[in-house]
Image (cartoon, rainbow, N blue to C red):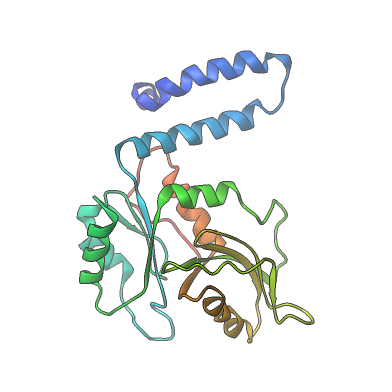
């Protein structure tokens, strides 16, 4: 579109496309995939040249009638920071945070209760999706993939993989951890919630967990052609 042609990002990208096309004249069928990755990286670079967005995860809100609030209302109250609500579990993208400390303090002031909060750089979330440890094979119909985020600094680094229960068919399986992030899968079962609670003890810190589909929705929002203040659909 003409809007794209006027965009600085596209000007940079066009040079890259011409170089890639010249290299790909030998019939390399991977050019389209490389082009898509190149576009995505240009979009990321453009956003991060002006600001460092944040991704914020609240722990244990809107669960079982406890610590209930309306995330969309909170996002509106924090609109000066460019906050976008993602789902109902207390997950936000913050486009204009000024600083982590300043935004965190303002968020805590606005919340109607005390809560554990994990504040992450957006680039770290994008990197997690890029290095996806789950692979390309889809999970079974009874298996849910998730990401847990450690809310406070912890030196605990348990060896992976870890399964709960340790004997017989697993209900929760942790497959990898990177810094404060833990990747895992769980089966849809009555006892699963109890095993998910054991992740806190493994890392000597409270963790907050999100469906991997929610993480991918966040990444899609962050890597969109232009920053959006419209909330995407997401899974808890």
Residue sitting at x 52%, y 58%: 179
From the viewer's perspective, tell me whether residue 192 is left or right of residue 42: right
Which of the two residues, 219 or 116, is positioned nearer the viewer here? 116
Give whichever of 234, 137 is nearer the camera.
Answer: 137
Residue placed furthest toward the right: 168
Q: Nearer the viewer, residue 159 or 118?
A: 159
Q: Locate residue 77, reporting x and y percent.
A: 21, 63
Residue 141 picture quarter: bottom right
Q: Is residue 22 left or right of residue 163?
A: left
Q: Is residue 9 above or below residue 232?
A: above
* In the depicted structure, whether residue 3 falls above or below residue 25: below
| Residue at the extreme front | 155
Q: Left or right: where does residue 64 sit relative to residue 213? A: left
Image coordinates for residue 156, horizontal then vertical, percent: 54, 69
**Residue 44 appears in which quarter of the rendering?**
top left
- Residue placed at 43% from the left, 67% from the top? 153
Q: Tell me where residue 225 appears, x and y as whole percent.
A: 41, 37
Which residue appears at 57% of the width and 28% of the height?
Answer: 35
Q: Position of residue 16 (x, y in %)?
A: 51, 20
Residue at position x 66%, y 18% in the image: 24
């Amino acid at each position: 579109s003409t809007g794209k042609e006027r965009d600085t990002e596209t000007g940079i990208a066009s040079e890259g496309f011409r170089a890639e096309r010249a290299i790909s004249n030998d019939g390399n069928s991977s050019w389209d995939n490389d082009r898509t990755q190149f576009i995505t990286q240009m979009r990321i670079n453009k956003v991060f040249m002006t600001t460092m967005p944040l991704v914020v995860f609240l722990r244990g809100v809107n669960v079982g009638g406890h610590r209930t609030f309306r995330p969309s209302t909170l996002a509106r109250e924090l609109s000066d920071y460019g906050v976008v609500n993602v789902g109902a579990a207390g997950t936000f993208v913050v486009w204009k945070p000024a600083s982590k400390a300043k935004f965190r303090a303002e968020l805590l002031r606005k919340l109607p209760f005390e809560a554990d909060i994990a504040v992450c750089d957006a680039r770290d979330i994008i990197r997690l999706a890029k290095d996806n440890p789950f692979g390309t094979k889809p999970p079974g119909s009874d298996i849910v993939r998730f990401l847990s985020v450690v809310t406070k600094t912890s030196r605990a680094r348990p060896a992976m993989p870890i399964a709960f229960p340790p004997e017989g068919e697993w209900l929760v399986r942790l497959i990898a951890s990177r810094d404060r992030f833990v990747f895992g899968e769980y089966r849809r079962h009555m006892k699963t919630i109890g095993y998910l609670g054991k992740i806190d003890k493994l890392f000597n810190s409270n963790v907050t967990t999100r469906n991997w589909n929610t993480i991918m929705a966040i990444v899609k929002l962050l890597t969109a052609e232009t920053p959006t203040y419209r909330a995407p659909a997401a899974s808890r």
